[in-house]
Amino acid sequence: MQRLHKAVKTAREEMKFTEKQTYDKSHRVKTPTWKPGDKVLIREDSLRPGSPVVLTRKRFAGPFVINRVTKGRDDVGIACELKNESTGKLTRNLVSSDRLKAYNTDREQFTKRLPRLETASKKSRQDVVTRD
């Protein structure tokens, strides 16, 4: 009976490992590389019941600065202690790395990647000039 239990346990562990590998591959999972001092945003998923701000809510809160990175067991991911950049207060609870997004302050790369949008009034003026 004990041999049967051991065989079932090893089979379950092997299956769990292969399922994790296929999930990580299909979802392009990356191991987090957060370190203290990084600026991040927190993904906000929760809504209060009856809230009128369902469609117009902000998806991310912040910016925050990572104060400390902690890791407990090997089978559980890392968690971060965050400090609000504007107030300097620490968050009440640790935040999982799954809810964090890097906060990019480099606007130069942003403007290179996304050109400025022209307003409708400029376009209409240009159309009038080209028609004459």
Image (tube, grey):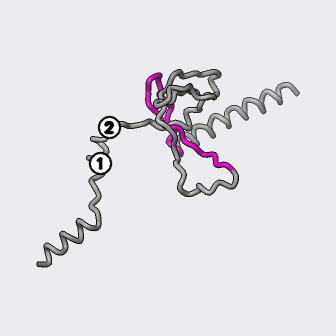
SS majority, magenta:
loop
Residue occupied by mark 2: 106
Label 2 secondary element = loop
Task: Return the residue nearer the eye: 44 or 84.
Answer: 84
Q: Quadrant of the N terminus?
A: top right
Q: Amino acid at mark 1?
A: Arg
Label 1 secondary element = helix
42 sits left or right of 72 in the view: left
Disc 2, disc 1: CB below 8 Å?
Answer: no
Residue that appears at 82% across and 29% down = 5
Question: How packed is label 2: few (under 14 Cα within 10 Å), some, or many (20 or more)?
Answer: few
Residue that appears at 52% across and 47% down = 59
Residue that appears at 56% across and 38% down = 99
Q: Amino acid at mark 2?
A: Asp
Of circles 2 and 1, the one toward us is 2
3D distance between C-alphas at marks 2 and 1: 12 Å
13 sits left or right of 23 in the view: right
Which quadrant of the view contains residue 4?
Answer: top right
> Which label number is shown at residue 75?
none
1 sits left or right of 9 in the view: right
Question: How packed is label 1: few (under 14 Cα within 10 Å), some, or many (20 or more)?
Answer: few
Task: Give the magenta-colored segment's residue range.
Answer: 27-48
Q: Is residue 29 magenta?
A: yes
Task: Give the percent coordinates (x, y) of residue 89.
Answer: 54, 26
Task: Give the percent coordinates (x, y) of residue 131.
Answer: 14, 78
127 sits left or right of 80 in the view: left
Residue that appears at 29% across and 67% down = 120
> Which label number is shown at residue 113?
1
Task: Return the residue nearer the eye: 15 or 129.
Answer: 129
